Image: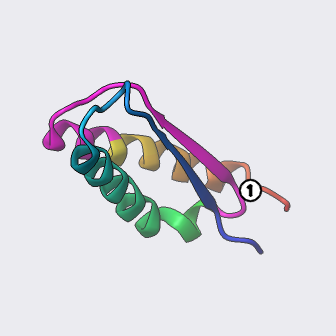
Amino acid sequence: MHSARLGLIVGKKAIARAHARNRVKRIIRDRFRRARYALGGYDLVVRVVGSVPDQELHQLLNRLFADLEKKACEHPADS
């Protein structure tokens, strides 16, 4: 069984400062790393379209990955 893969799109228009973009990408990658094997063989692309405070970002990611893990358990990817 394949593990999930992650693609990130965080543009300058969404978050102007490079250090802020890198921080957001680091937070998303870390949360993905913890959910990777529960997601099975799915490929995910996360596109950031605006800036949010770190606390809200963590809450959004936790909710997103919890939903994805639930769906992956219900409908496992074959490839």
The C terminus sits in image quarter:
bottom right
Residue at image position (59%, 43%) is 45
Q: Is residue 73 or residue 68 the one in the foreground?
A: 68
Is residue 15 shown left or right of residue 69? left
The x and y percentages for residue 35 are 47, 63
Is residue 56 rendered magenta in the image?
Answer: yes
The x and y percentages for residue 27 are 30, 56
Residue 76 higher or lower than 9, as above or below: below
Q: Is residue 40 or residue 53 the one in the foreground?
A: 53
Tag 1: amino acid = Pro
Is residue 37 shown left or right of residue 12? right
The N terminus sits in image quarter:
bottom right
Is residue 65 shown left or right of residue 27? right
Residue at image position (24%, 39%) is 17
Which residues make up the magenta segment? 40-60
Q: Image quadrant of residue 71?
A: top right
Q: Which residue is most to the right?
A: 79
Is residue 8 rendered magenta in the image?
Answer: no
Residue at image position (67%, 49%) is 74
Q: Which residue is mark 1?
A: 76
Is residue 18 shown left or right of residue 41? left
How many numbered dots are placed on residues in this image?
1
The x and y percentages for residue 15 are 30, 32
Residue at image position (28%, 46%) is 18
Q: Image quadrant of residue 12?
A: top left
Secondary structure of the residue carrying numbered label 1 = loop
Q: Image quadrant of residue 2?
A: bottom right
Q: Is residue 48 or residue 60 the one in the foreground?
A: 48
Q: Which residue is most to the bottom?
A: 1
